[in-house]
Image: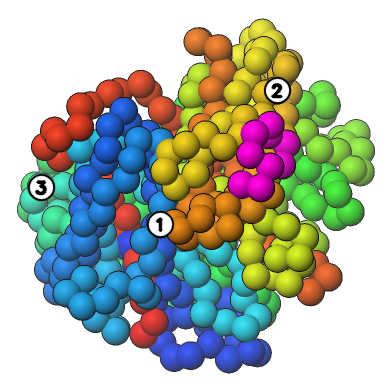
Amino acid sequence: MQRIKNAVLLGCMLLFVLSGVAMAENPANQTPFITSFTYQNIGSGTATVSFSFYSQASGNRVTTVSRTLPAGAGSSIFMGALLGSEALPSAFIGSAVMQSNQPLAIIQVQIPQSTTVKNRPLSIVFPSGSSPIYVATVLKNKFNAMTKLAVQNVHTTNADLTLKFYNADDPAAAPIEIQKDNLPPGGMAYYDAGTLPGLADGFNGSAVVTGVENDTTTPANIVATTLELQTNDVGARAVEAISQAAKTLYVATALCNAFGGQTTAYAVQNTNLSTATEVTVHYSNGTNETKTAQPGAKVSFSGCAASGMPTGFSGAATITSSATDIIAIAKVSGLGYFTAFMAETAGASKLALPYIRYTSDANYNTGARQRAFIAIQNIGATAVSNVQVKYLDTNGTVVGTHTIATIAPNAKANSKAIDASGNSASLLEFGTPEGNPGSGFGGSVVIEGPAGSQLIAIARITSKIGAGEVAEDYNALVIDGTALTSGMAAAYTYSAPLVLLNQ
């Protein structure tokens, strides 16, 4: 049962599918997508992985797919290529739960089925849920964009959901609330902001999503992700909802009209529902900007708005809150870019990037293949030396290593496959069939600094479109050193709230 009280509910699903065949003139919000999962084994033994898919309509499991993956290896599973007993229904929309005997790093990739929309929205698949979770940006025909939100129940019992939407343009307004009852385990609730009557046209805000066990006040674990799609153009990006909040956040990329016209924007949400807070963005060149975030609401920052910010700036940022915990997402726009990624609460000495590609000029310039560019920031108090960026093929073999001599505190360094020393043929066509003879597409990265170092990283996946480019970003995932022996029973569970197949 679903109850709406002046409200709108958005949902996080593993597979998102839109109706019809994309026409050349269709904008991103009218484009169908097919989901792919790119996953990396960050454990010590061969991983046995199962993907179970749940229908949004019924909440029932539809099919289960099993795969194996060597230690260190990266691979992908594409919903449009599943056949026979593994195949999903042609009109499927739902969620997924993955189980593995080894820890994994997983990225959910939405592949547009269009001649004009080429960007691939990327979001992280998390190993656990929580409640509440925070959605820093929700748009309804605002900035020529629309939000689609999917919320998945990853609890062991049926859950009741409550979504509260806070209007950034009218912080004094009461939040708009929507509820959904009795969502089964593994199931997801999916909502398109454009069709929700509780949200006014032009809505610009944030959301807080809570889950409880059915008809109780006991918290239920949930996860969520969003798609943000342009209504008049080809821009498409995704970002996961966030559960970890802090008074200090770190962002590996900050831009002001850099590289010919790329600029970052930050949406910062106050997670406290009763107390306002002062939010300051500290850029790595010494400039700052401060705004007040009302309870539950977001405030937005442009990379060029800080007093004294020079055009052409490329650096990093730290975001602080005076009174309450905050979360933030970063977006890069300009020159065709339409990206989104999370601000981080902490760093780690070892990170994983499961979806990394590189290709020759001939393959890149035609738009046939992608390139990945990695930004690594040192958020520690001292310089970090000898950072190893290891590029691994589909068998988990390191085919090249890029050694970064030093990264100063709060500074960042960059890496791409051809910066590494190793197998030059595999690195020029890294993650492609030529780079993985007989194994198809698949390539991943492990970033390793000295013990105790505090590193964060994002990967930017770019595609050439005519004379320009499109791009999307995702955050590196922490490798915590957990080791399991090969053959153990499934011990790790991951949930993906947005799965799409042509519909």
Q: CA distance from mark 1 to mark 2?
A: 28 Å
Q: Which residue is mark 1?
A: 76
Picture quadrant where residue 102 is located: top left
N-terminal of the pair, mark 1 or mark 2, is: 1
Residue contact at pointers 1 and 3, CB within 8 angstroms: no
Callout 3 environment at 10 Å: few (<14), some (14 to 19), or many (20+)?
few
Q: x, y (%) of residue 415?
A: 69, 36
In-front residue for pair 257/248: 257
Question: Quadrant location of the N terminus?
Answer: bottom left
In-front residue for pair 10/86: 86
Q: Which residue is mark 2?
A: 404
Secondary element at tag 3: loop
Q: Is residue 87 left or right of residue 112?
A: left
Q: Residue at x 27, y 38 (%)?
A: 46
Secondary element at tag 1: strand
Q: Residue at x 72, y 16 (%)?
A: 406
Q: Which residue is mark 3?
A: 156
Q: Is residue 424 left or right of residue 498?
A: right
**Which range of residues does the magenta coloring cover?**
418-426
Residue 319 highlighted magenta (yes or no): no
Callout 2 environment at 10 Å: few (<14), some (14 to 19), or many (20+)?
some
Q: x, y (%) of residue 158?
A: 10, 55
Q: Is residue 53 left or right of residue 424?
A: left
The amino acid type of the residue labelled 2 equals Ile
